[in-house]
């Protein structure tokens, strides 16, 4: 005859004693009492020794008052937003619309290039700041509603939180074939390919590593005009003091003159093919590669030289920082040798490649008999510059090592552009007019700030060695929150691995309740 009995079992990992009700029966084969049809009653309170009933772990599908939503990533992103003041700045710029913008930004970051049409589905299954479903039509209306006035207020708030270190400034091109976007122009991207495009100019704070502001500009605008517009923008946003770090693509006499005319401190990369840079390398290569100029931290030889810059019939003091990397020199040597071997084979075997034509003309010449040989003088001249690069600055407070460190950290803005185009789906935005473009761009920029802060914390904690950005989001996206109209929301389950992620990122971990 079967009988019901209470059974207690201790979890070896947590030490919690669970109480079950089970039917007992006699197993004739083993001649032992066995248990079946176990039902969990609760757990033992360690303080009182009483059995505490467990609450239901799953809402009834037929109960319209309850639901389960994914909450783990929202908790992380909301915490980061509060810590860096992003939520407060959105409220300042877009009162009443800030939560909707934050929700779209979280979707863009979490769903990794998913189409905006999927946002409605995502908003039904996830906790997000807006708290209600946003249809794709409502999202489009929101993009069109976001105005430049709110954007200016938002940028001013972000500028006020930025540090006083160097600011990185760079541009990237975004392709678009819409005929209704005012700033679309035919221009050339970084690969010199002509396309109808928009230029996206971004300022990033070197101290925090976070984007501060941006501008969408006509696709055919020149670098000189960009610098002049940048100087005007900084005044409009209330930036009193700025030190710019620029990629070598911005080096030109006109740009340097414009910066010096505004008495602005700058650090810009220079090509070694520039006449005065090449001469400085030839004249100072022996001193540069002396042991006393070796920087152990960067494993690079560094030398700062004072130079005179011709500016409006006067001389301005500037500094040329010469750099030599032995590792880079070996890498350049290896890459050129491999390239020359491939080019020689293609030429002498008659298998020419269209994309190599400029290399054939530069490095080889044809001799009698139709054979091709290398232009040794050109190759030797190029090898002389292997491992060398240079920076130009008018900041007397920067040592050679400091200048190199600042410039090397410029890759933060390159990673930001990579996120905008690849992860956040803005390589070719599917928008039809200027208003929608600017609204979606603002939401993408908010997502970029969150992505930059998250990447920075992952790197600082070393957790980036275990997780990619998407892998970390996927790990936390399994945490659910149970909501019922008659009860406070509660977290279902949080693993130790998930708690460790929160702690590593400086966020209060969620706990099951």
Image: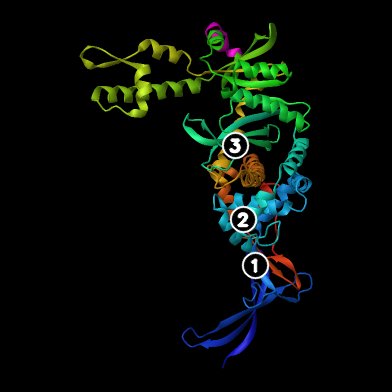
Task: Please state which of residues 327 and 84 is positioned toward the viewer in this rendering.
Answer: 84
In the rendered image, residue 354 lying in the magenta stretch gets the answer: no
Quick one: 355 or 295, which is closer to the camera?
Answer: 355
Residue drawn at (59%, 23%) of the image: 250
Residue wearing tag 1 = 68
> Is label 2 or label 3 in front?
3
Distance in Å between CA atoms under marks 2 and 1: 15 Å
Q: Position of residue 459 (x, y in %)?
A: 62, 40
Of the 4 image quadrants, the one containing the C terminus is bottom right
Residue underneath mark 3: 183
Which residues lie in the magenta part? 282-292
Q: Disc 2 marks which residue? A: 476
Which residue is farthest left?
Answer: 369
Q: Which residue lies furthest to the front in this view?
A: 180
Q: Residue at x 32, y 29 (%)?
A: 353
Q: Residue 150: image x %, image y %?
A: 74, 44
In this view, the mark in front (3 or 1): 3
Question: First in sequence: mark 2 or mark 1?
Answer: 1
Q: Disc 3 and disc 1: Cα gap in Å?
A: 44 Å
């Amino acid at each position: 005859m079967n009988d019901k009995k209470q059974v207690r079992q201790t979890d070896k990992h947590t030490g919690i004693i669970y109480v079950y009700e089970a039917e007992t029966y006699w197993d004739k084969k083993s001649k032992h009492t066995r248990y079946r049809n176990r039902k969990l009653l609760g757990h033992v309170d360690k303080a009182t020794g009483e059995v505490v009933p467990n609450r239901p772990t799953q809402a009834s599908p037929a109960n319209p008052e309850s639901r389960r939503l994914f909450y783990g990533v929202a908790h992380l992103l909301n915490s980061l937003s509060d810590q860096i003041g992003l939520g407060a700045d959105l409220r300042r710029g877009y009162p009443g619309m800030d939560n909707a913008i934050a929700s779209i930004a979280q979707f863009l970051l979490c769903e990794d290039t998913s189409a905006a049409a999927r946002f409605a589905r995502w908003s039904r299954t996830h906790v997000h700041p807006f708290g209600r479903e946003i249809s794709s039509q409502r999202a489009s209306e929101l993009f069109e509603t976001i105005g430049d006035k709110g954007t200016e207020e938002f940028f001013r708030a972000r500028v006020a939180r930025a540090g006083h270190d160097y600011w990185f400034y760079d541009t990237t091109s975004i392709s678009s074939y819409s005929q209704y976007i005012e700033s679309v122009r035919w221009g050339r991207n970084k690969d010199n390919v002509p396309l109808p495009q928009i230029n996206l100019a971004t300022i990033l704070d070197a101290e925090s590593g976070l984007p501060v502001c941006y501008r969408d500009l006509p696709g055919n605008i020149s670098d000189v005009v960009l610098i002049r517009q940048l100087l005007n923008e900084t005044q409009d946003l209330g930036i009193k003091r700025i030190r710019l770090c620029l990629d070598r693509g911005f080096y030109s006499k006109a740009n340097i003159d414009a910066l010096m005319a505004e008495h602005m401190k700058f650090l810009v990369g220079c090509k070694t093919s520039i006449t005065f840079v090449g001469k400085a390398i030839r004249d100072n290569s022996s001193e540069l590669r002396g042991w006393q100029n070796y920087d152990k931290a960067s494993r690079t030889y560094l030398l700062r030289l004072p130079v005179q810059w011709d500016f409006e019939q006067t001389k301005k003091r500037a500094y040329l920082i010469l750099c030599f990397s032995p590792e880079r020199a070996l890498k350049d040597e290896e890459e050129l040798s491999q390239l020359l071997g491939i080019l020689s084979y293609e030429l002498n075997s008659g298998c020419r490649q269209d994309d190599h034509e400029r290399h054939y003309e530069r490095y080889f010449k044809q001799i009698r008999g139709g054979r091709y040989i290398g232009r040794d003088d050109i190759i030797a001249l190029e090898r002389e510059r292997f491992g060398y690069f240079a920076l130009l600055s008018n900041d007397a407070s920067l040592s050679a090592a400091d200048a190199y460190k600042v410039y090397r950290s410029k890759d933060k803005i390159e990673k930001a552009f990579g996120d905008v185009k690849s992860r956040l789906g803005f390589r070719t935005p599917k928008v039809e007019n200027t208003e929608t473009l600017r609204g979606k761009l603002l939401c993408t920029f908010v997502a970029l700030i969150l992505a930059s802060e998250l990447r920075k914390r992952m790197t600082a904690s070393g957790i980036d060695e275990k997780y990619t950005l998407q892998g970390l989001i996927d790990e936390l996206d399994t945490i659910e929150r149970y909501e019922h109209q008659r009860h406070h929301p509660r977290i279902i389950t949080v693993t130790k691995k998930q708690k460790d992620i929160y702690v590593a990122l400086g966020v209060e971990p969620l706990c099951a309740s």
